[in-house]
Every structure is written in structure tokens, then in C-alpha cells.
């Protein structure tokens, strides 16, 4: 497998997962609407509310994430080596220069945020600068620039909204049972089977939506790995960087479950078994490294 085929494969799988998201929302809305007797009207209202609530986070989530991470913006004078590395790779990628932030933490890691290439930022820990050599650092930065160029942050924002719609609709249906509304359709039309399917959908749909989100996140990491290797023309640099970051035992103190999916390597846990990996926001490091070294 070469770099170009890896990128094409990940793009196809990404669109497939998005279509599955849309199909899941449509199916859940239809089944729950039939069970309650309200049709799709309340489903549409849930979608509007979820979209409105995400508007603020879409435009300001990058500032919130950077603040939570205690990231401080730096200039060329603060760290010429890092600034020039990012600048040179941006020229090669045809990207505008993102804002550069430094996180004062000895655990090596990095992430990119922002809604598009003109409103993007890269945050790097001081530990990453200390523990990686030049080629490894270039690999990590190229990976993060690929997230920006591929509009991964925007895509994941859309996915978060879709997950929110599924969770909100399911939650509304389950809450309606407490007020006796859920059984009206069942009593009127004898739709016991439909009501049972609705119950199962309300319980399982949020779980399935989360799994789809995690799967999409993992595909985007593979895509960013391939795109980053294409940018540097040296997959081994990123492969070595991933191994070093994963092997480092220091905890990234500013990371939490809300921001973990942004980092190049999951800063919270090492998912080693197959079942736990279903709920991981990142692919196993071994798979990523093997894929890079097969290019």
C-alpha cells in the first residue's frame, strides 16, 4: 500500500461512516416518531436544538480548548526552531501559517484546532520539543497540519452535532415514558412491536453513534498520518515519533476526556485489548506505525 492509496481508502471510509450516521438518525427518528404518535415533528425540533447549541462551540471551541490546555501563544522570537519548522512545512503544504501555542508540560504530545486553515492553531508540549529529534518533530507537525488541510476539525464538529442529535432524541423518548406518552400509540393501534423497537433504538442508538464517532476519529488519524508522511516524504520520522510519544510514561496533566481526541496520541489511556479499543478515539499505535512503515 502506498501513501496515495491509503489516503483514498480513508476518504472513502470516512464518507461511508458519515452516511451511516445520517441513516442512523433517520431510522431512530422514524421509529421513535411512530412509537409516540408524534411523527417526525419532535425529531426535527431536536435536530434544530442540537444544531443551535453547537453553533457557539463551532466558532469558539478552539479558544476554549486552548484555554483548558493552558496553551500560551508564542512568536518567532520565543522559539525560532519551532516557528521555522512549522513555516517550512506550511509552504510545502500550501497552507497559511497557523498560530503556534506551547503547553508547558514535559509529556510529549500535540494537537491542532480551528474551524478552517485560516482560523487554525497548533499546540505543542514542551516535552515534545525536548524529546524528539528534527525529523520526528517534522513528522508530528506535518500530521497536525494535515488535520488542518483535511478540515478534520470541522468534520469532527459536524459529527459531534450528529451524535448530539441521536442522544437528544433518545433521551426525549425515554423521558416521555415517565409521563405516560410513550404508550399512547401502542394502546391505540396495538403497536407493541413498534414500541419495543423504539425502546431498543432509544437505548442502543447513542451507543452506536458513539462507536461511529470513534471509528471516524480513527480513520482521520490514519489519514493524517498518511498525509503527513506525504508532506515530509519521510514516513519513518512520524513512525518513530509515535513510538516515543506512546512509550513515554509521563501523564499529560492538562488533558481530559473532552480534549483527548484532539491529540496525536491518546494522552489518557493505553488501549491494549480489542474490546476497549472500540471506545478509543485513536487507532492502536502499533497499527499506525506498521502502516507508515509499509508505505
Image (cartoon, rainbow, N blue to C red):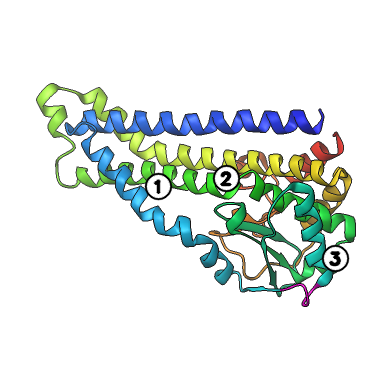
Q: Nearer the viewer, residue 256 or 225?
A: 225
The residue pinned by badge 3 equals 131
Q: Nearer the viewer, residue 164 or 138?
A: 138
Disc nearer the start of the sequence (2/1): 1
Could you tell whether 27 is left or right of 8 in the image?
A: left
Residue 277 position within the rendered picture, expressed as x and y whole percent measured from the top left: 63, 43
Residue 164: image tag: 1
| Residue lying furthest left | 188
Quadrant in the rendering for residue 3: top right
- Mark 3 → mark 2, Cα distance in angstroms: 29 Å
Magenta range: 75-79
Quarter of the image where the C terminus is located:
top right
Residue 7: image tag: none
Could you tell whether 20 is left or right of 76 in the image?
A: left
Determine the residue positioned at 31% across, 33% down: 29
- Mark 2 → mark 1, Cα distance in angstroms: 17 Å
Amino acid at each position: 500500500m502506498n501513501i496515495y492509496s491509503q489516503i483514498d481508502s480513508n476518504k472513502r471510509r470516512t464518507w461511508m461512516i458519515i452516511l451511516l450516521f445520517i441513516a442512523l438518525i433517520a431510522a431512530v427518528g422514524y421509529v421513535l416518531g411512530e412509537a409516540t404518535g408524534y411523527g417526525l415533528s419532535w425529531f426535527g425540533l431536536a435536530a434544530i436544538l442540537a444544531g443551535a447549541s453547537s453553533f457557539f462551540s463551532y466558532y469558539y471551541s478552539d479558544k476554549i480548548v486552548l484555554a483548558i490546555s493552558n496553551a500560551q501563544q508564542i512568536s518567532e522570537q520565543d522559539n525560532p526552531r519551532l516557528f521555522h519548522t512549522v513555516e517550512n512545512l506550511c509552504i510545502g503544504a500550501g497552507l497559511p501559517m497557523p498560530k503556534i501555542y506551547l503547553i508547558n508540560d514535559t509529556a510529549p504530545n500535540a494537537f491542532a484546532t480551528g474551524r478552517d486553515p485560516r482560523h487554525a492553531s497548533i499546540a505543542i508540549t514542551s516535552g515534545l520539543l525536548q524529546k524528539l529529534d528534527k525529523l520526528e518533530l517534522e513528522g508530528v507537525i506535518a500530521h497536525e497540519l494535515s488535520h488542518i488541510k483535511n478540515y478534520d476539525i470541522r468534520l469532527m464538529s459536524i459529527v459531534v452535532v450528529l451524535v448530539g442529535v441521536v442522544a437528544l432524541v433518545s433521551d426525549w423518548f425515554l423521558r416521555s415514558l415517565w409521563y405516560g406518552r410513550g404508550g399512547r400509540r401502542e394502546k391505540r393501534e396495538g403497536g407493541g412491536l413498534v414500541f419495543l423497537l423504539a425502546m431498543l433504538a432509544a437505548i442502543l442508538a447513542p451507543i452506536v453513534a458513539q462507536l461511529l464517532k470513534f471509528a471516524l476519529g480513527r480513520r482521520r488519524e490514519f489519514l493524517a498520518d498518511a498525509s503527513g508522511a506525504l508532506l515530509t516524504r519521510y514516513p519513518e520520522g512520524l513512525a518513530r515519533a509515535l513510538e516515543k510519544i506512546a512509550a513515554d510514561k509521563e501523564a499529560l496533566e492538562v488533558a481530559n476526556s473532552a480534549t483527548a481526541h484532539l491529540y496525536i496520541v491518546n494522552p489518557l489511556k493505553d488501549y491494549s485489548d480489542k474490546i476497549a479499543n472500540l471506545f478509543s478515539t485513536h487507532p492502536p499505535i502499533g497499527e499506525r506505525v506498521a502502516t507508515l512503515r509499509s508505505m
